[in-house]
Amino acid sequence: MARNKLTFLVYIIIGLALIGVVTQLYSNATSFLANLFLMIGIGVAVFAAIYFLFLRNRAPSNDMKKYKKAVKQSKAKYKQRRNPNIKTSTRKNLQSLQVKKKPSRRASHLRVIEGNKSKKKKRASN
């Protein structure tokens, strides 16, 4: 019951805020927009101050250093090196050989079991 009263109170406050915003926008729009931009600017300034003072200088964790090192090693290991000295004609021949190869199809692991479907099953109820 108290929860219903609380939600009703929140809806009333939101409705009054909307009415205030609309009347402020209608009566003097320039000061409303100036106040809006001022609030956004102050919010950005506070966020930037918090970010540059506290968040930016945090040292990365030891796990993150290990992860970045592993990624770097993996990229170095699996990097595809292409030889630029191969002539284009031999490269085309290699590509045509690769296209002509057909992969062998494996035999299916499923098989058909022939059954005698014409016989009726003997049941205990018959």
Image (cartoon, rainbow, N blue to C red):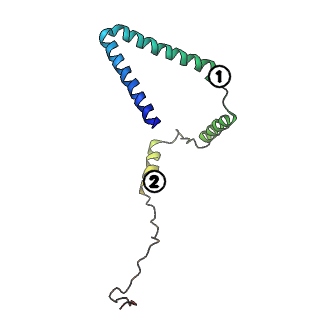
In terms of secondary structure, where does tag 2 sit? helix
Q: Please identify the quadrant where the N terminus is shown.
A: top left
Q: Is residue 107 left or right of residue 119?
A: right
Number of numbered discs on residues? 2
The amino acid type, in three-letter code, at marker 1 is: Asn
Residue 22, image x, y percentages: 32, 17
The residue that mark 2 highlights is 98
Density class for disc 2 (Cα within 10 Å; few <14, some 14-19, many ≥20) is: few
Q: Can you tell which quarter of the image residue 64 is in?
A: top right
Residue at 33% in and 10% down = 29
Q: Is residue 103 left or right of residue 30?
A: right
The nearer-to-camera label among 1 and 2 is: 1
Question: Quick one: 118 or 110, which is closer to the camera?
Answer: 118
Mark 1 near mark 2, Cβ–Cβ under 8 Å?
A: no
**Label placed on residue 10:** none
Question: Quick one: 117 or 126, which is closer to the camera?
Answer: 126
The residue that mark 1 highlights is 57
Q: Judge whether 105 appears above or below 24 on screen.
A: below
Question: Quick one: 40 or 97, which is closer to the camera?
Answer: 40
Residue at 67% in and 34% down = 65
Q: Judge whether 66 appears above or below 48 on screen.
A: below
Ranked by sequence position, the earlier of labels 1 and 2 is 1
Q: Is residue 21 left or right of residue 57?
A: left
Residue that sits furthest to the front in the current view: 1
